[in-house]
Image (cartoon, rainbow, N blue to C red):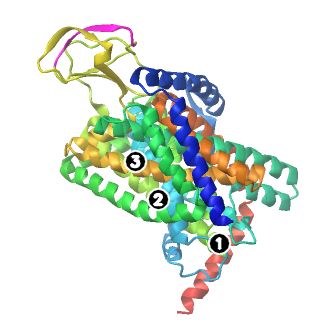
Amino acid sequence: MKASFISRSYLFILLNLFLLTFCLPLNAESSMSVDQKIDQVLEPAANIAESVVFWSMPIGGGKAIPLVLIVLGTTALFLTIYFRFINFRALGVAARTISGKYTAKDAPGQITHFQALSAALSATVGLGNIAGVAVAIAIGGPGATFWMILVGLCGMTTKFTECTLGVKYRKVDADGKTRGGAMYYLQDGLKEMGMAKLGKFLAILFAIFCVAGAIGAGNMFQANQAHQQFSDTFGILNQGWQFGLIVALVVGIVIIGGIVWIARVTSFLVPFMCAGYMLAAVTVLIVNVGEIPSSIGLIFTEAFSGSAAAGGVIGAIIQGIKRGVFSNEAGVGSAPIAHSAVKTDRPASEGLVALLEPFIDTVIVCTMTALVIISSGMWNVKADAINQLDIVTAPESQSIVSTVETGTKFNLTGNESEQGTKWLEVKVFKEDVTGWVKSDDIKMRDGDGIWLTSEAFATVISWFPYLLSIAVILFAFSTLISWSYYAEQAVIYLFGKRNDVIISFKFIYCLFIILGAAASLGNVIRLADALFFCMVVPNLIGVYFLLKVVKKELSSYLDHVRTVDSSK
């Protein structure tokens, strides 16, 4: 029966994705209209979600900071102090735990500590480390990097806390399969404290937000940025839905196998991806070694000065925290879903393994990306142009009067949106031209996101963007498959283990890959941020109520570690 089910699932996804191609236009003109329609659909949803989720608290001087970022930042700091800086003093124990030294061989669960860490990292070490860092620097200046690092360090304790709870309250079925995550420690943990109704309500709320966050941050944003980098670098599959369809097919094949397949794929991909990306980043930094001291200086000085690109020091703080949390997901409640599948009978053991995620993801990978961008100087490039165009957009039906030189990039003024500087890239002509340039001959592009990181790498070796494109696709792919599992577990919590519901969800998830690849970066990233951060509220309520449970589990596990170490 199992083999038959997998076979039917596989055929169902492939058949639906194949039929979808007949619903999409097959020529360039009509496919562009589809992209525009998708963007129009997303824009009002992004506006509403963003205004609600990122309600900002005035802090004087005409400045304001989103309340959700204040909550996440103060929670991470409080937990770090509450657990007496466990994020630093238990690093050694965490590293040894990965090897399985302190875990019983017959412990319940489906995957090893390393596989659980890889699966969770594959969801966090993604485009947030590449495109997200660039967005933070483009909007908040180099100082945003400092706040990203701080969020990463303190977020280690938040990740430890929620993942310990994830294992503590997970469900182990008769067939050995596990179900876990914030839904279960909200439901059962608060029930133990006499707040069953509140726990059930928060669990359902979290599960709904988890599905929405998976579609936004874990799906559409990843597909969108991967397509942008791929099409810009290789010049093929320029229509987003074409690229998205191919990615959706591959993701659909993998996610049929559940957490075991996902863990196998990610445990192979994550070390390879991180090592390859870090090697490329180190190469750039070696070439720009003379700029590293000044780059580090900029990170610290602009973190506390008023010179950040948007909003001074407040702009740096907001973007640093926002991108830092988006990158490592500490406090969001997603990671406990992956870590709940680990083979262990001691919840705090996986909590300690989990605290390594923000360190690897934000403190190491994100910092490397930031240094590459800042040391290359690309974060502050101002194009030299004969005539600066005083426009924000170039409508499709209009032409632009300007003197154009071969390869000139025009820095457009008057754009105060959060999407950063917009550039007008003119096609390279055989000779300089003067006069009218039709809109068909130009390309509008955001001066941030994956493009900024790609340009920074290209300053050292011209073919680096090709390697980056491969890395981006792998990062996006690993994040897509991991978040599909997160959302699937939320769907199972809401509707039970019904095969028809699970398969239908997987198809819808793959469909949104296509939609995300076709939409504009602006609306995708705004909607993704909002949906992603919705998960924070119910999750952190549960975390605060269950702190004593975590403290007890930590004390028990550290005693176990000391006993094992003293016996050898």
The image quadrant where one finds the N terminus is bottom right
The residue where tag 1 is placed is: 109
Task: Where is residue 65? Give x, y as percent.
Answer: 57, 33
The residue where tag 3 is placed is: 473
The residues tagged by marks 1 and 2 sit, at their Cα atoms, a distance apart of 25 Å
> Is 13 in front, or is 401?
13
Q: Amino acid at mark 3?
A: Ile
Q: Which badge, 1 or 2, is on the more N-terminal residue?
A: 1
The residues tagged by marks 3 and 2 sit, at their Cα atoms, a distance apart of 23 Å
Quick check: 300 left or right of 405? right
Residue 316 forms part of the magenta stretch: no
Q: Which badge, 1 or 3, is on the more N-terminal residue?
A: 1
The residue where tag 2 is placed is: 359
CB atoms of marks 1 and 2 within 8 Å: no
| Magenta span of residues | 396-405
Visible residue check, residue 186: yes
The residues tagged by marks 1 and 3 sit, at their Cα atoms, a distance apart of 30 Å
Q: Residue at x 45, y 52 (%)?
A: 362
Helix, strand or loop for disc 1? loop
